[in-house]
Image: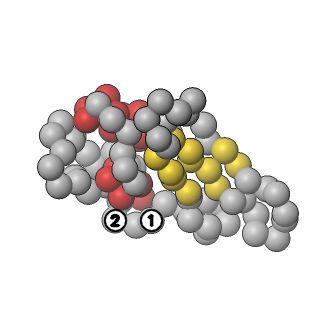
Amino acid sequence: NQAIMDYKMDVHVVPGNLEDLDKRPEGVSGWNGSYLPDSMQGQAPVDAWDQLIVYRKNERGSKRPYDLYSEGDPEKEEDRIDAN
């Protein structure tokens, strides 16, 4: 969540995808990353269960500019963990 907000401060919009936090998207000015901690750079972000973190940029004007969540423990139903 902090990486997304740092990106937004520099670029003035939320990233289009999580990869934009680690590698400068083409045509974007103000990018000052990587915004990810060293341990996460160069790899897809995963949760404690090694499930991919889900990021979705929402339509402009939406209540929340993006959704960021983990599906949680794959052995439990409805264990989604929202980060925002």
Q: Where is residue 77 in the image (x, y as percent from the top left)?
A: 84, 63
Query: Residue at 73% across / 53% down in the picture?
Result: 80
Give the residue type at disc 1.
Ala
Query: Residue at 36% across / 58% down in the picture?
Result: 19
Tag 2 residue: 42
Tag 1 residue: 44
Cα distance between the residues tagged 1 and 2 = 7 Å
Query: Residue at 66% across / 44% down in the picture?
Result: 82
Query: Residue at 40% across / 67% down in the picture?
Result: 43
Check residue 73 in the rendering and tell me which mark sits there, or answer none.
none
Relative to residue 26, is residue 54 drawn left or right? right
- Say how the picture is coloured: secondary structure
Element marked by disc 2: loop
Q: Position of residue 10 (x, y in %)?
A: 26, 32
Q: Where is residue 26 in the image (x, y as percent from the top left)?
A: 17, 55
In the image, is residue 28 above or below residue 46? above
Q: Is 58 in front, or is 21?
A: 58
Q: Do the numbered discs 1 and 2 sit on residues whose CB atoms are within 8 Å?
A: no
